[in-house]
Image: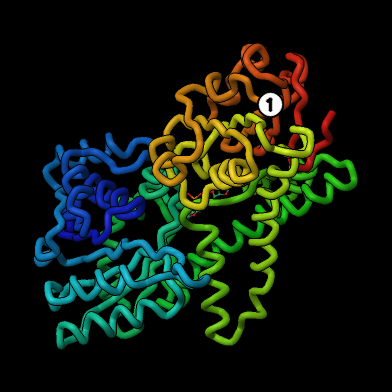
Amino acid sequence: MGLAMSVIGTGYLGAVHAACMALEGHDVVGVDTDEARAVALARGEAPFYEPGLDEALVAARGTGRLRFTSDIRAAGDCTVHFLCVGTPQSRDGLAADTTYLMAAAHALAPHVRGDALVVGKSTVPVGTSGAVELAMSGERGGGVRVAWNPEFLREGFAIRDTLHPDRLVYGVDAASASADVAVLDEVYAGQVGRGVQRLVVDRTTAELVKVAANSFLATKISFINAMAQVCEAAGGDVVALADAIGMDPRIGRSFLNAGLGFGGGCLPKDIRAFLARAEELGVGEALDFLRAVDRVNLGRRTRVVELATSVCGGSLEGARVAVLGAAFKPDSDDIRDSPALDVAQRLHRLGASVTIHDPKATHRAKAVAPELNYSDSALGACTDADVVLHLTEWPEYRALDPADLARVVRAAVVVDGRNVLDAARWRAAGWTCLSLGRPAA
Ligand code: UDX
């Protein structure tokens, strides 16, 4: 028998969680203040591109166990409530903006049953679970049990990561630990049954686990990108370097892909929010290295702008630049803090005429960067280009025939911002291939 649960906030995290929970046998109502989003989800249409999500929504709807609404009262009968609301970077600083999360907690509070468990999944500054509990209890005039259960899903693999996570982390309050763990075990009976490890910790640690994990991943990427800078100065090859150090199991090869660096809705804002929170806690210095992580990351974008400028003879005025990719990574249409789009906009501001192609993210990119030109094919974007920049590693770009592209460009120069193109093949077709942290020839 499944549980009756609500999922408050149906962005990347909430929409995927709601669909997966229904597929696991629970009775789920997804609630979002954005009515159009709720209506689309109810039709089985994800408001963003995520492989397999439309199919999962349709399948879950078919079971009769998944609904979406903008009416918070629909959450009233549930025994578990998941808070999946976004916590973006604040407009005026590095900290995370928890306004939407707290607003959701306030809105939900009057409808929570006395025996229900509220489970936070959003990525939050450490201490937020206590603030949520206080706010909800105050609103209801009685105790509300709050647990924290961070999510580690990656865009592009969100369904798989939800159904087969590396681990489950239950952050529970000591006063209600056994009851809360029992509820979470029921929620995740499918995953636990499939052998997924679960770790029971206090809520503070659970909140920290998420930001620590993302900080570590960001640090790994910036580490290899710092090595790329050294390789550029000394003449080394960062990909061979990553392969060699990655063979040490203590280091590991994953997240050592040097290139244009990280973007998206999580890594950049999470390291900044962690820094801001550490400052508040009086331990800002301990996380000082995250400033360098951020700096190295943003520096890679400048490097690509410089490479493009030098290829175009030192000035971008009147130059035509083709940009392959707008999303922050492949298999996503997310352009939040996208390195590719950032570079494209900077080149435009420096006087270049920039034409972008992306298999999925064009509509989103157009909305925030209408000044750029868009093409619905990679070949179209490259036509008459003085330089081609490969900035998001969609598999279809690796499958392009460099000889076809060489026929349409003005100059056959490609900058591989992700170090994944087969440089030998491109060179054989007459291209000059430049990359980040690798020798030019
Ligand atoms: C990340 C975490 O991986 C996930 O666990 C967490 O829940 C949310 O944040 P996501 O933002 O979907 O997930 O993307 P991820 O696959 O981690 O990539 C982040 C960025 O790093 C992308 O821009 C990607 O291009 C870049 N990246 C990744 C590199 O530049 N090099 C690498 O080796 C790996």
Q: In the rendered image of this protein, does residue 44 appear above or below residue 336? A: above
- Quarter of the image where one finds residue 432: top right
- Quarter of the image where one finds residue 390: top right
Could one spot residue 178 in this view of the protein?
yes
Residue bearing mark 1: 386
Residue sitting at x 52%, y 45%:
328
Q: Residue 174 at x, y = what percent?
A: 35, 83
Residue sitting at x 17%, y 39%:
43
Residue sitting at x 28%, y 47%:
20
Q: Residue 136 at x, y = what percent?
A: 23, 80
Farthest right residue?
A: 234
Q: Residue 356 at x, y = what percent?
A: 53, 32
Quarter of the picture holding the N terminus: bottom left
Judged left or right of residue 241, residue 168 is left
Q: Residue 276 at x, y = what percent?
A: 54, 76
Q: Nearer the viewer, residue 7 or 191?
A: 7
Q: In the rendered image of this protein, does residue 403 appear above or below residue 94? A: above
Q: Nearer the viewer, residue 388 or 74?
A: 388
Could one spot residue 250 in this view of the protein?
no
- Element under label 1? loop
Q: Nearer the viewer, residue 351 or 80?
A: 351
